[in-house]
Image: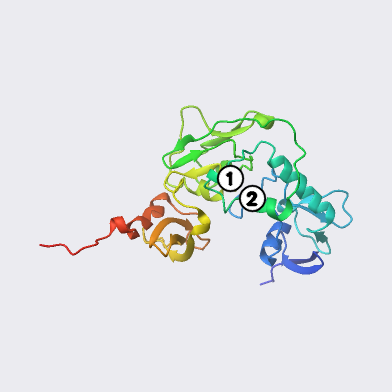
Amino acid sequence: MSETATVTFKLNDRDVTVPKGTTVMEAAQQQGVYIPHFCWHPGLSIAGVCRFCMVKVKGGRKLEIACNLEARDGMEVNSVDEDVKEAHKWALEFHLVNHPLDCPICDQAGECGLQDYYMKVGKYKSQMTRPKVLKPKALRVGEDLVLDTERCILCSRCVRFEDEVTKTGALGIFSRGDRSIIGTYPDKKIDHNYQTNLVDICPVGAFTSKDFRFKQRVWFLKDKPAVCPGCSAGCHVNVFAKPETRSYYRLKPREATANGHWMCDIGRDMYEHLNQQHRLRFARTM
């Protein structure tokens, strides 16, 4: 059998060899090179809508998006050039144009892509003077889902998840321009057993889980790897808890062969029996 074809290129002056067909974003992830992104997710198709993962290719006429740029032999890619940093700054600026300043009450605070990227590639004085566009808040779009469309940056991860993973097509992007919103179709709600995955893949806290909403700040939690005991599938998970009080708050999927990037909503409830209110405190008398 012939060996898999490979390509070798430079990424920030480092020689990188990857299988042919690998994108620059995938190669960067494998090499531990940080390229900011919102819409790209390893378990979904490439959309290229956030325009945030810009990189510079030597000899190219313009910057290109790393998520949809296939690595080629001899190509030289730079993700830290001043032109690239300037592009990241402006992409972030446009993502924040209509974003509400509700970080103190947002469940995503502490693990929010917008917060993280602002601290890493932002820290600038905004030049936008127009008032923010107000959009619907706290919409009950599923049994365990709350949608705040003001926070949404239209990365389309949730729409692609519904189309490609659950194949239910329950979400769409409606209207145009800065009035565009993510939402369900009229008189419809999201109704399947993988709803909370939308919370996991949302980078900005537009989707929140009713079960976890307002219960705890993520920076107070410690996570440990485990295996979900809900069924024989053996999904790999991370358990989030406060060890000092023996309180458990959520399970999130951990990428593995058994479950890929996802897990079901039934499995997410498997932490509840660990908490004190569900356990015996005193011996029972017969």
Q: How is the image coloured?
A: rainbow
Tell me the tag on residue 243: none
| Residue lying at 88% horizontally and 49% vertically, measured from the top left | 61
Residue in view at x 64 percent, y 43 percent: 155
Picture coordinates of residue 14, whole percent (x, y): 79, 69
Q: Quadrant of residue 246?
A: bottom left
Check disc 1 and give the amino acid type: Cys
Q: Is residue 264 above or below residue 283?
A: above
2 or 170: nearer the eye? 170
Mark 1 surroundings: few (<14), some (14-19) or many (≥20) residues within 10 A? few
- Residue at x 77%, y 44% (from the top left corner): 90
**Of discs 1 and 2, which sits in the foreground?**
1
**Labels 1 & 2 near each other (Cβ < 8 A):** yes
The local secondary structure at tag 1 comes to: helix
**Residue 56, how many percent across, how many down?**
82, 55
Quarter where residue 73 is shown = bottom right
Seen in the picture, residue 164 relative to 221 is either above or below; the reply is: above
Residue 270 position in % (x across, y down)? 37, 56
Task: From the viewer's perspective, tell me whether residue 125 is left or right of residue 189.
Answer: right
Q: Which residue is the site of mark 2?
A: 115
Q: Decide which of tag 1 and tag 2 comes sooner along the chain.
A: 1
Residue 108 in sight in this render: yes
Crowd band around label 2 with a 10 angstrom C-alpha radius: few (<14), some (14–19), many (20+): some
**What is the quadrant of the C terminus in the image?**
bottom left
Q: Is 274 in front, or is 231?
A: 274
Residue nearest the observer in this picture, 51 or 96? 96
| Residue 103: mark in rendering | 1
Q: Secondary structure at mark 2?
A: helix
